[in-house]
Amino acid sequence: MKQGGIAAWNIAPLFKGLGLASMVIVFFCNSYYIMILVWGLFYLVHSLTDTLPWATCGHSWNTEQCTELFHLDLCLNGTANASAGSFNVSCTDLANKRSPVIEFWENKVLRLSGDLSEPGEMNWQMILCLVTTWVIVYFCIWKGVKSTGKIVYFTALFPYVVLILLLVHGVTLPGALGGIVYYLKPDWSKLAEAQVWIDAGTQIFFSYAIGLGALTALGSYNRFHNNCYRDAYILAVINSSTSFFAGFVVFSVLGFMASEQGVDISKVAESGPGLAFIAYPKAVTLMPLSPLWATLFFFMLLVLGLDSQFVGVEGFITGILDLFPQPGAGSMRREITAAICCVVCCLIDLSMVTQGGMYVFQLFDNYSASGITLLWQAFWECVVIAWVYGADRFMDDVARMIGYRPLPLMKWCWAVVTPLVCVGIFVFHVVNYKPLTYNKTYVYPWWGDAIGWVLALSSMLCIPCTVIYKLLRCKGSLRERWQLLTTPIWGHHHLEYLTPEAEAKLLAPEPPKEKATLFETVI
């Protein structure tokens, strides 16, 4: 169809809310995800020094509780009577001490307030990083995929160079082998925990950009006969292989960090922003030439984040532009739309560079583009493709494009397997739902969770609301409405994309009908 995330659902106009929902999700995702890039840029700038600022105390953002004894974690995770490694300091003396890495993150980067209701002041340094990042994103995507595609050759390949360098360095560190063994040795008992399945499902859906409309937008620029079936396999293999490879990089360093501090590796492994901005920076301070490795790591993080941001913004802009007729040559429509999108997202992001910004970030992260919304979206996409449009018809469409039918397993995945998996993980989410917390200590107020659910429902309700609206607006019996609203609207045909047989069939005169009702004529 060569359409973006909204217009592509003309295959079943009744469910065009799927496209709207994906645009809402990707818009929210574009708004908050860029904060990873902003923090990465901030750390990158502060890495260009002789001594990393988060390696020592004595700075303006440090408190009296700051200590450079990295064996502090041994006390926090061990017993009160343990000695702090080779230092002749009791754990009682270190009970109220804080690491300079944590103080840099919370007091310098976040300037964290005590509550969601206390937004506090804006951080002008973070505002500068925020504007810089959005300017970079804009000038990389404003001309479309032709310019973005050239930039991505660097942003997609350079991280592999850095990952290899980090791995080569990481495996030479003492304790690295223990970290890698910990990474490769599974704890099978964890499979009995619902949260493991929730996290795994959410990660896969988010990592593959499923339900965001971004891949649909990028695919709309392909030639008609592009082998999308092969590309789907390649995408999955490269994505998961990269994640698996990156695990060796991360855990070799975490193993070294655990060895240096004399604690179990499970005590130093963090999740979320804590891994990139607390655990890894702490590990880097223990290495020789620490500014070099910090610079490489945060530059890689920035480049990786830009890749994801390009795709998200491109997917949103393409979906919006495809709703309107094509303009004449020389139109600035795309550039203006991209500018408006970036400015609006940047204004939303100002709430995340305040002292309460991390609390706002977590609301967006846990609700607007969470596992619940993506699973809901993916479930309905599979249902519409397999049961409304028809799995066999979809297989025929793919075959017309690539010249052969995909494996029958694909049809069963669309029709049965994936919807059941989505429902199962979704139910796990609901049953195991707990109020949102920050750092396992601060519990969000009820109105904070309410705001989060508003963000989640703003996309989820697009689907049923659109169905109800279209059914009420349409004329005829319920069966006639259903048939009319689930009939594909293909728009104009591109004869140059069709096979000779398909073109001959399309151009062949239709046999006269003996009798046709008005409804059949409309169809």
Image (cartoon, rainbow, N blue to C red):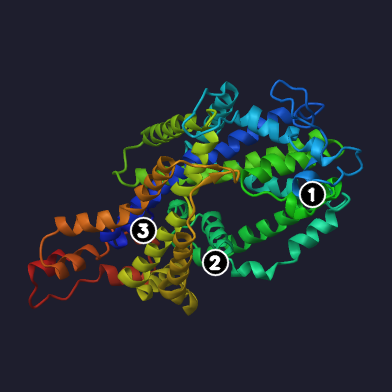
Marks 3 and 1, the one that precedes in the sequence: 3
Does residue 231 lie above or below 356 as drawn?
below
Answer with the quarter of the image where residue 44 lies.
top right
Residue 430 appears in the rendering: yes
Does residue 501 lie above or below 98 as drawn?
below
Q: Which residue is mark 2?
A: 230
- SS state under label 2: helix
Q: Amino acid at mark 1?
A: Thr
Marks 3 and 2, the one that precedes in the sequence: 3
Marks 1 and 2, the one that precedes in the sequence: 1
| Quadrant including the N terminus | bottom left
Q: Amino acid at mark 2?
A: Arg
- SS state under label 1: loop
262 left or right, relative to 339: right
| Quadrant including the C terminus | bottom left
Separation of disc 3 and disc 1 at Cα? 63 Å
* Mark 3 touches mark 1? (CB < 8 Å): no
Does residue 185 lie above or below 349 as drawn?
below
Towards the viewer: 56 or 482: 56
Q: Which mark is residue 79?
A: 1
Separation of disc 1 and disc 2 at Cα? 54 Å
Towards the viewer: 175 or 315: 175
In this rendering, which labeled residue sits more in front, label 3 or label 1? 1
Residue 145 appears in the rendering: no
Query: Residue 328 in the image: x percent, y percent?
Result: 32, 37
Separation of disc 3 and disc 2 at Cα? 19 Å
Q: Which mark is residue 1?
A: 3
Disc 2 crowd rating (10 Å Cα; few below 14, some 14-19, many 20+) is: few
Towards the viewer: 233 or 56: 56
Q: Amino acid at mark 3?
A: Met
Figure label count: 3
Disc 1 crowd rating (10 Å Cα; few below 14, some 14-19, many 20+) is: few
